[in-house]
Amino acid sequence: MSEISDAQSEQTIQQRSLAKYRKRAAAYDASCGPTWPIRERAIAALCLQAGQRVLDVGCGTGLSLELLRAGVGAGGRVYGCDQSPEMLTLACRRQAEAGWDNVHLLHSAAQQLELPEPVDALLFHYTHDVLRSPVALARILGCARPGARVAIAGIKYFPAWLAPLNLWVYFKNHGYNGAPGELGTPWDRILPALDDWRMTPTQFGMGYIGTGRVAAANAA
Ligand SMILES: C[S@@+](CC[C@H](N)C(=O)[O-])C[C@H]1O[C@@H](n2cnc3c(N)ncnc32)[C@H](O)[C@@H]1O
């Protein structure tokens, strides 16, 4: 594909996602109960330490913020970014109500994100569109220090023996993403930028948690 059509399809995917989350935002939190243990596991895998800086990529309504803040403590900093104004408004409300002054929320697509400092850890929790965008990935990795810990959780296709269920997985994913599909190995575009990659299937194989570290060549 040419650079122009790449950029056009990138914009189309972002527009589709924005439209989906405009409708989904209000009911989003209520739909996240079943994946709460996955969120806890992914955040635990970041092994956050007091004073560190962490970025919640596509932070949505901010459901991970409290756990991330607990990890870095009052002396650390939590950044969150999301392109959906409806989702980010709910995250900002959560932050304001809790009075977290070390949580900084940015209304920005991952593709254009700018942070004031490199972070020590990156969380991608159910952010399929960001993981499929090379432009967004380059930008996010450039916001991290070399060796920064990365945790990724999301949906993927079941293994071959459960393949008939993958039509359902596809349509489930379709409701949330501008670029549905590509669910075989959804992490494969970030993989070349990471060291120490480990992937653990979850939910009988229709989910995964992956961890790694940002390789020096791709970092800030
Ligand atoms: C399934 S939600 C996950 C939200 C949150 N990470 C969570 O775990 O609850 C996906 C989020 O990614 C955001 N998103 C999608 N594409 C994005 C992009 N290119 N840049 C920033 N955010 C994006 C959506 O607006 C949405 O809030």
Image (cartoon, rainbow, N blue to C red):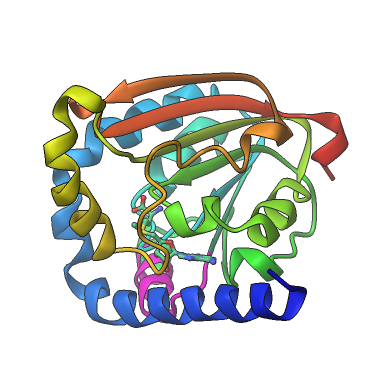
**Which residue corresponds to the image point at 49% horizontal and 45% vertical from the top-left?**
124
Q: Quadrant of the N terminus?
A: bottom right
Work out whether residue 207 can be spotted. Answer: yes
| Residue 36 horizontal/vertical position (percent) | 23, 38
Residue range in magenta is 82-94
Left or right for 33, reference 74: left
| Residue 196 horizontal/vertical position (percent) | 65, 17
| Residue 22 horizontal/vertical position (percent) | 31, 81
Residue 47: image quadrant is top right
Compared to residue 140, the image places residue 88 above or below, namely below
**Which residue corresponds to the image point at 75% horizontal and 64% vertical from the top-left?**
114
**Which residue corresponds to the image point at 63% horizontal and 33% vertical from the top-left?**
191
| Residue 111 horizontal/vertical position (percent) | 66, 66
Q: Quadrant of the C terminus?
A: top right
Residue 136: image quadrant is bottom right
Work out whether residue 48 can be spotted. Answer: no
Q: Nearer the viewer, residue 139 or 2?
A: 2
Left or right for 197, reference 157: right
Compared to residue 154, the image places residue 170 above or below, namely below
**Which residue corresponds to the image point at 66% horizontal and 52% vertical from the top-left?**
137
